Structures are given as C-alpha cells and as structure tokens.
Amino acid sequence: MDRFELGKVLGAATKGIIHGFISQYVPIAPDIVTAALGYYLKERQTGFWRDFGEGLFIASVAQLISPFIQGIAGRLTAPSAAPSATAAPKTIEVEPLSVAKAYAGVS
C-alpha cells in the first residue's frame, strides 16, 4: 500500500471522529459539513491531504446515501404478502412410530 492509498484509508477511517466533532460544535447537518470538508481538501490540497480529503469525501457521501440504498433494498426484498397474525398455524397430529416407518420405507 503506498502513501496515497494510506491517505484515502485514513480519511475514510477518521470520518466518524470528524463527524462526531462537528456534531458537537456545529448546529447543522454534520454529514454535509464532513462531505464539504472532504471535497475542499480533495480539490484545494496536494499530496497526502488531497488523498485524505478524497477518502473523507467518499465515506461521507456513502453515509449520506446509505438510508436511500437501504430503503430501495428493503422494498426489493420485502415479502409480497405478510402472513396474517390472526391465522393459527396448521398442525398435523402424527404418531412418531408412523413417521419412522415412513422414513425407513416400511409400511
């Protein structure tokens, strides 16, 4: 791993720390401020800080869009018809010996 990849990894890893710091002291949406800070570093700085800002920006955008992705995935995987809570489950009364005989192939 070269130092530029390390900068991106550290930017993404410290996103939570920066997010927590911003949410303590800035009264606006910390995800948006963190993304803006990452974008600023990505566009205005050079070397390590540019890669750090890119990692911070990518992690912030991922945090911003994750509720939408979860909502879409939840709709795609939701069951079409939910089982009724009032319907009692069907039970079948079977003797254990008859089950064993059927499994063994003996009539």
Image (spheres, rainbow, N blue to C red):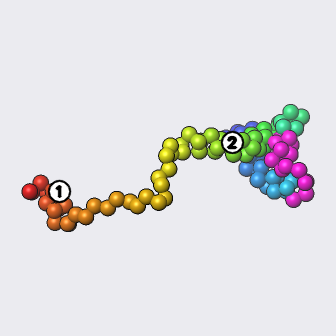
Question: Is residue 41 visible to the viewer in this orientation of the structure?
Answer: no
Numbered label tally? 2
Which structural element holds mark 2? helix
Q: Disc 2 marks which amino acid?
A: Phe
| Quadrant that contains the N terminus | top right
Outermost residue toward the top in this view = 43
Question: Is residue 12 visible to the viewer in this orientation of the structure?
Answer: yes
The residue segment tinted magenta is 24-38
Task: Give coordinates of residue 101: x percent, y percent.
Answer: 13, 60
Per the image, the residue denoted by label 1 is: 103
Density class for disc 1 (Cα within 10 Å; few <14, some 14-19, many ≥20) is: few
State the residue at coordinates (8%, 57%): 107
Outermost residue toward the front in this view = 86
Predominant SS of the magenta segment: helix
Disc 2 and disc 1: Cα gap in Å? Answer: 49 Å
Does the magenta segment cover residue 100? no
The answer to which of marks 2 and 1 sits earlier in the sequence is 2
Does the magenta segment cover residue 32? yes
Task: Give coordinates of residue 59: x percent, y percent.
Answer: 74, 44
Quarter of the rendering containing residue 95? bottom left
In the image, taking residue 93 as reference, residue 15 lies left or right, namely: right
Which structural element holds mark 1? helix
Per the image, the residue denoted by label 2 is: 68
**Label annotation for residue 84:** none
Task: Give coordinates of residue 86: x percent, y percent.
Answer: 47, 60
Nearest the eye: 75 or 89: 89
Quarter of the rendering containing residue 73? top right
State the residue at coordinates (65%, 41%): 69
Nearest the eye: 66 or 46: 66
